Image (spheres, rainbow, N blue to C red):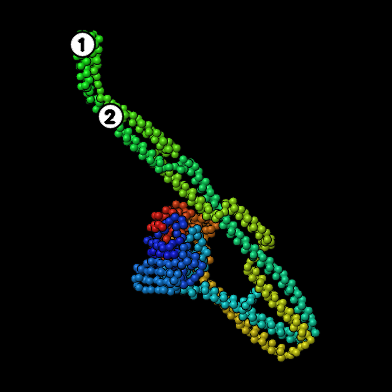
Amino acid sequence: MYLKSLSVKNFKKFKDFSVDFPSDITIVKGPNEQGKSTILLAILAGLFYDPKKSNKDIEALKSWNSDDLYEIKMEIENEGNEISLEKNFQKKEMLLVNKTTQEEINTYKEISDYLFEIGALRSLPLFESTACVKHDALSLITQGKREISQALQSILTSSSENVSADKVIKKINGILTDLQKGLKQASKTPGQLKELEEKISELKAKKEKIIQDLQDIAKKSNYLWSLREKYSKLKKEHDAKSRQYENNLKYFEVVDELDKLNEAFKKVDSDIQKIEDIEKKIEYIILKLEKMKPLKGFNFKDFYKKLKKAEGLHAKIEYLKKHQEASKKEKKSDKKTFSFVLAVFGFAFLILGGALGFLFNEIFYAGIAFGFLFLAFAFLGKNKGKSKKDQKQNSELKKLERELDLLVGHINAVFSENEVKNEEELMKKIETYNDFCKELDKLKSKQEGILRGQTSKELKEERRELLKNIGILEEKISKEQKVNAPTPQEQRLLEIDLEKMSDELEKLKDEIVRVSAVSNQYNTSNEDLVEVEEKIAFLQEKKENLQKKVLMLEALSESLQSAQANIISKSKACIEDYMKKYIFAITDGRYDNVKVNDDLSFEVFSSEKQGMVVPEEHLSQGTIDQFYLVARFAILDILNKGKKSLVLLDDPFHSFDAKRRENTKRVLMDLSDKFQIILFTHSSDYDSWGEVVKI
């Protein structure tokens, strides 16, 4: 049998979810609380739960957001046959369809028998004891010894589980119990033997009474005295046991209240631990945020505008510098500017000065001076308009450079203040700061959810109050009760004794009244004595026949138990051989010899101890887990009778080191031709074990 896929609706946290199991070893990987264990529960419910039933186990699996029950669908392959199994717990319907043969089954028993036939799936308790390994439960296989033993018997005797030796023995022992009920201890509904004994006792008492009546009526007064003495003694014993019974009731009430307080204390203590862990994380985040304090209220939009403005200024400055360089090159090639107007004025002054110089010397010199001056300006003058433009550009360039220096200084100050080198590092730091802020909000929200309006101080005060109340209740338990605590079974026996004593007291009271009444009036005859003796003889013979029947049933039960032990002896040899095949490899040769006891407990040979030892008492936890992993597959190999079956592993190897994981991987890969293995984990250490399915 090979489970190909699983689909669920309204199942715990999943509203509508599907997952495939594509290989002999499938690794279902996902973070914690993502639903890995929920998928495992869905597989168990799909294979073993009856949709027509209603119980707390079925109710516990319904969706968190719906009152409706769930639907489960499985796709299965078996020897080339495609099989679909659907269970609708809301409609209380189920259907198994072999798509290859068109065979359809819609009853729980028929579907269970079919799954047993193709995949050796017997019962949920047996599957959980062998093929379903939950977290930290590898070594708990011995808790299912009874289911495993019964399954081994059904295989080795070629019988169904309904007629196994275990059930026959149980039925025989039930008959023996019914026959012998009340012989060893008091019972409200005694068995046939006890009833016969009581009837015989009553008849014998009647016989004795008749004899006494006939022989000596005078002795009646002595008989009455003994009855009253017996009544008084029994009354005292009854009163003492009544007081003990009431004290026990008070003890059970105190223990029950203590259990409730201890449960409440565990819950509050767990909440306090969670709060302390959260407070440590908050303190760490606040410390980190304090180191990034400059980012608090940081206006990245404004900073981004300044970056863009700086880039624009830089580009503009570069443009002006290039323009100035071009202007300088142009000035070098320019000729001096000639002014025609100034030249005319110059020549005019020269002519005028020369013409009038003959009359006035001053006019001559002045005219000549002004003429040459104007000519000089005319021939030597520069392009003044162009010079002013250059000055304006220089001024603008300096202004832009000052503005750019100011912006760059501000930007570098921001980088320096936040201990980054560039914009990219600043962005990463801002992102980290925001992540810390979000994480801080989440932690505070989680803290508020745990506190539920309380303060941490109030929660601790509640824990102290619970401890105080626990101490007060424990003081109510007496030293005797602490040393020898009463049990519900003892209380029940005490209750039965009290009821029996009350009945006996009533009988004694009635007997005293009766004897007192007949003391003065007897009408007993020999015929009454004969009749009583005949009844006693008849009942005595009937009792002897029942005692013979009891002996016969006890002998039969012993024979069946002996046969049962022989069956287990045969199977344990097979388990030992199978385990020896793998225990050497998985433990790197440290252990190679194992022993299975009649009660399905295990021992392993220790070279250090030079003998067989119990794994739980002498091996490390990792080796114990390896040992019982191999034991599980050894038992499953026998139970499966050659059929490929399903094994579910809910992250049981988290404590294994790398070497143990590698050894375990090799063993599981070797076993994957006989078993379909689904491993649920959050770790990537198992990615190479098989095909990974992420959720």
Occupied quadrant, residue 661: bottom left
Residue on which the image places disc 1: 356
Q: Secondary structure at mark 2?
A: helix
Q: Is residue 514 left or right of residue 263?
A: right
Numbered label attached to residue 576: none
* Residue 628 rendering spot, x and y as whole percentages: 49, 60
Instruction: Say few, some or many: other residues with alpha carbon within 10 Å of mark 1 (under 14 / 14 to 19 / 20 or more).
Output: some
Cα–Cα span, label 2 and label 1 = 52 Å
User: Which residue of the protein is positioned furthest toward the front in this rendering?
Assistant: 359
Check disc 1 and give the amino acid type: Leu
Instruction: Say few, some or many: other residues with alpha carbon within 10 Å of mark 2 (under 14 / 14 to 19 / 20 or more).
Output: few
Occupied quadrant, residue 171: bottom right
Q: Nearer the viewer, residue 206 or 651?
A: 651
Q: Earlier in the sequence, mark 2 or mark 1?
A: 2
Nearest-to-viewer mark from 2 and 1? 1
User: Which residue lies at the image location 27% right of the left edge and 27% below the top edge?
Assistant: 386
Q: Nearer the viewer, residue 171 or 77?
A: 77
* Residue 607 rendering spot, x and y as whole percentages: 51, 55
Q: Secondary structure at mark 1?
A: helix
Occupied quadrant, residue 486: bottom right
* Residue 68 rendering spot, x and y as whole percentages: 46, 67
* Residue 381 rendering spot, x and y as whole percentages: 25, 21
Residue 271 visible, this angle: no
Residue 67 visible, this angle: yes
Compared to 45, does 526 lie above or below? below
Residue on which the image places disc 2: 325
